[in-house]
Image (spheres, helix red, strand yellow):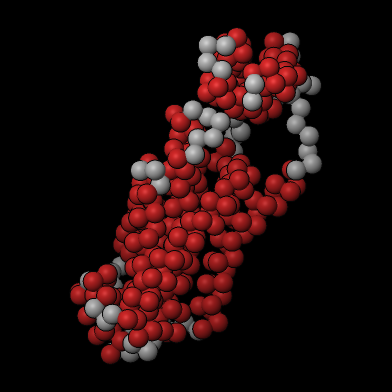
Amino acid sequence: MREAAFVKQNKEKWIAFEKAINFNADPDPDELANGYIQLTNDLAYAQTYYEKSKTLLYLNGLASQAHQKIYKNKKESKNRIVSFWKTEFPLFFKQYHKTLAVTFLIFAVATAIGSISAINDTTFVRLILGDAYVNTTLNNIADGDPTAIYKGGSEIGTFLGITINNIRVGFLAFAFGVMASLGTVYILFSNGVMLGAFITFFYTQGVFFEANKQIWLHGTIEISVIVIAGCAGLIMGNSILFPKTFSRRVSFMKGAKDGLKVVVSTIPFFIIAGFIEGFITRYSNMPNWLAFLIIGGSLYLIVYYYILYPRILNKRNANKPTQLVH
């Protein structure tokens, strides 16, 4: 786009924002912040295509004024943590639903590969899960309790250990996104292959139903949020690969910040999954209806919060006009 066309397209918006900064004694801080985001997008575009131009100098100056105004007037909610999970994050995450779909597809393909490999190669499960785990589980199956391994250790110890480990894996899936998404894809792929081999192992031993009834009590949330943490890594990695109108540095900073928000959102769900594994999964004799109620409720919780609820909130806010000047 030519510079003249760029200025003509955005001039009125810039003037309105400038008036809000200089002539509105008490501007709404949230609307000011929204205008600032739009301004920084335009500034990044100008830095890329109109270096050393008067337009760039003007936008730099305006952005500096806006920054000072925002941090002077911005009012933080007393319930900042609650509002993050209740409103801010779901509204924000809607834009990354396509990235989440790609992440899920990568994980699903890896799971299928792990399952097919376990069916066609009897040594594959031992290669992926280790001899010690396989031998212990075979003994448990022979004793009539395929998931007895979940009954070992104290309830609190299991809860804390599993929760900490899962959060670590989630943050690794995010952090490895800095390797242009390749690191995150590796984490997703290796965990998917492991899951496929793990589930198929019980199928080959004829205890598929009994094992899955217990595994998915905690696994529904645990596996789902690992995929979501992978989505966070792809958000950061893709910001390096596809900076769009931003400079690569600005795009990376934005992607890292957005990805961090996503991975932080998974922490409560990892805690829930750890609690279920530590305190509930060990009861293998629970009624089938109760087990499937917990599994179904866990699946609904994830789908509702990360997919349905963001759409509901965005649809609810779609027709609300945004004004910079009151």
Q: Nearer the viewer, residue 259 or 139?
A: 259
Place of residue 48 in the rendered image (x, y in percent of width and height, measured from the top left): 52, 23
89 and 184: which is toward the camera: 184
Residue at the outermost front position: 2
Quadrant of residue 106 within the rendered picture = bottom left
- Residue 162 location, x and y as percent? 34, 61
Position of the C terminus by quadrant: top right
Pick the residue in front: 134 or 197: 197
Residue drawn at (57%, 52%), measured in percent from left and top?
98
- Tell me residue 259's x, y (percent): 47, 43
Q: Residue at x 35, y 86 (%)?
A: 204
> Residue 1 occupies which quadrant of the picture?
top right
Q: Is residue 211 above or below residue 166?
A: below
Left/right of residue 54 with respect to residue 318 in the rendered view? left
> Is residue 216 in view from this perspective?
yes
State the residue in front, 326 or 291.
326
For the point 57% across and 37% down, the residue is 80
The reply to whether residue 201 is in sight is no
- Residue 193 in the image, given as x and y percentages of width and height: 36, 67
Q: On the rendered structure, is 326 left or right of 196?
A: right
Q: Residue at x 70, y 21 (%)?
A: 5
Q: Is residue 321 left or right of residue 232?
A: right
Quarter of the rendering containing residue 194: bottom left
238 shown above or below 297? above
